[in-house]
Amino acid sequence: MVLGAIALNVFRESVRDRVFYNLLLFGVLLVGASVLVGQMTAGQDVKIIKDLGLAATSLFGLFIAVFVGIGLVWKEVERRSVYSLIAKPVRRPELVLGKYLGLAFTLLVNVSVMAVVLYLLLGYMQWASPENLRAAWEAPATDPALLKALLLIYVQLLLVTAIALFFSTFSSPMLSAALTFGFYVIGHFNADLEHFDAVVTSTPIVWLLRALYYLLPNLAPFDITAKVVHGQAVTPGYLLMTIGYAVVYIAFLLAAGSYIFARRDLK
Amino acid sequence: MTAHRGARPLAFGLALATLVAAFVGLEVWRDRVYGEPAPGDSVLYVRSGEALRRMSLSFSPLLADVYWVRAVQYYGGTRLSTSSTRRYDLLYPLLDITTSLDPRFNIAYRFGSIFLGEDYPGGAGRPDLAVALLEKGFRANPTRWQYLQDIGFVYYWWVGDYRQAAEWFKKAGDVPGAPWWLRSMAAVTLTQGGDRRSSRVLWQSLRDSADNTWVRNNASLRLSQLDALDAIDQLTAIGAEFRARAGRHPASWGDLVRARMLRAVPLDPTGVAYVLNPVTGAVTVGADSQLNPLPVGSQADRPAR
């Protein structure tokens, strides 16, 4: 009940902050691109619209997750509204979790609307394309497998939100943003950490890097855009394992963030 | 008071519109006086596809699309350029980056190799790079026998090396799932070399098995070129017959029509009239025909045995 009220409040605040204006930009970007790419891409317009739609969903979601996520807790402390909240029967971990769920819901609405816009546009392209052109596509324009890519994009955004929220429980927004973007970048590079033994001879360093590989969030597996767009199979087992990894990692970040925030001196 | 409040936004809007008109007007004036700034030459700041792939994080498919658009624009722009020194230097790097960013980008390999392999000035005239691109594609997609078939075509059509072409057709036929006729294509290529009839069989097979409209259209264009070469042979023979009768080359198609050797001005498969040289009697396709340039001097120039 308390969690729901806090989460709903975060969602309303997102609406008030005009977060959903990005949807308008997304729609204009996709429709504009669909008009342009057909002229310039030698018959690759459906592939490009899929790539663009998925990349834009991921990028816009990333900005919302980071820039809204870093302010969730910090704003309450800065405005001192946190005092009135914790004076009520609301525990600090509930506050952190409620804030997280609110932003998760905001992102869900955002990604869902983007998915609908993307499918509508692709549906139109499928309808407007002649049979011989459709036969050359690696996957149908309205391929349901796109939902798998959208699902993993959403789950990745949930993980990034948890990272941003974790940092916002103890640091300033600027530092939180820098750290979250840093983790996002590292998250896409950290497969290299596992293979450093090819260039580093020191065993302790190799072990340290391997430990970092396992400890830092690994975001590369969430990126299945290329596979889906090219009609390659993504198994349910892979999806479940990747989502399971995210769920556990998010639980860890929220628990750690709640612990830190619970012990933070707010005076 | 109300009128004053209403007037202020209007005045402000007018002021803004004036400022916009002023800077646009100044730009137009400057361009008229000093000329519009020339667009910069195409530049590739990063040439390593692998480096770009890493820098693009999870956005490499989208970046691959950007580079593919650049490659298409670069090829089209260079091909349409009227400069006598036009070059296709950036074409291979652009395609290499595209396919490094998205190793499954099928059309980038297949059509990219056409851009690269075609004789200069219609293409880059670099069959070696076309083969390199297709080999890269097959390394990344070992079930795509079409890339090996395309390599065979590059050797067949642009290099004129039928032994190599047959070898690649055979390799394509060895890929699990490849159609059976690739092996017979290899045999035909090896035994009949590059006469026009075997060229026709090869291009028809490519057209019928194409997984992409552009590849299919390209095969259809090659078939039309072969038709045009057949027609040119016939028209040259008719011109020679006229010369034997009249003691001179026909001055125009009209001479042949009046002599009842032709019914009308002959048109190539794209509907453009063939060109007759009244001095030498040579026949070729019109300068504005889509069939230009014909693969003159290549194996396809040989009539069927």
Image (cartoon, helix red, strand yellow):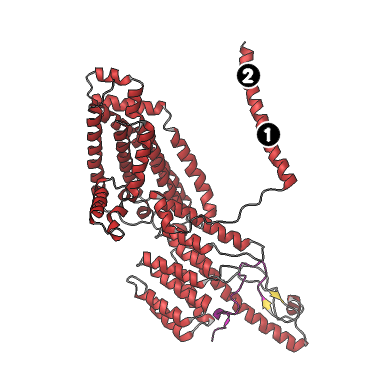
Q: Position of residue A127 (x, y in %)?
A: 45, 50
Q: Are marks 2 and 1 on the same chain?
A: yes
Where the C terminus of chain B falls, by quadrant? bottom right
Placement of A256 over or under B94, stated as above or below: above
Q: Which mark is residue B8?
A: 2
How crowded pointer 1 is (Cα within 10 Å; few <14, some 14-19, many 20+) is rated as few
Instruction: State which region is magenta.
Output: B284-305
Which chain hosts label 2?
B
Majority secondary structure of the magenta segment?
Answer: loop
Q: Position of residue B284 (x, y in %)?
A: 66, 75
- Circle 2 — which element? helix
Residue for point 42% across, 69% down: B135
Q: Which mark is residue B21?
A: 1
- Circle 1 — which element? helix
Q: Earlier in the sequence, mark 2 or mark 1?
A: 2
Q: Are marks 2 and 1 in contact (CB under 8 Å)?
A: no
Query: On the image, which quarter does residue B12 sit in?
Result: top right
Give the residue type at disc 1: Ala
Q: Position of residue B279 (x, y in %)?
A: 76, 80
Q: CA distance from mark 2 to mark 1?
A: 20 Å
**Is residue B70 on the magenta stretch?**
no
Residue for point 40% across, 46% down: A54
Placement of B25 over or under B178, stated as above or below: above
**Residue A42 in view (yes/no):** yes
Which chain hosts label 1?
B
How crowded pointer 2 is (Cα within 10 Å; few <14, some 14-19, many 20+) is rated as few
Closest to the observer, A167 or A200: A200
Q: Which mark is residue A193?
A: none
Query: On the image, which quarter does residue B290 sit in?
Result: bottom right
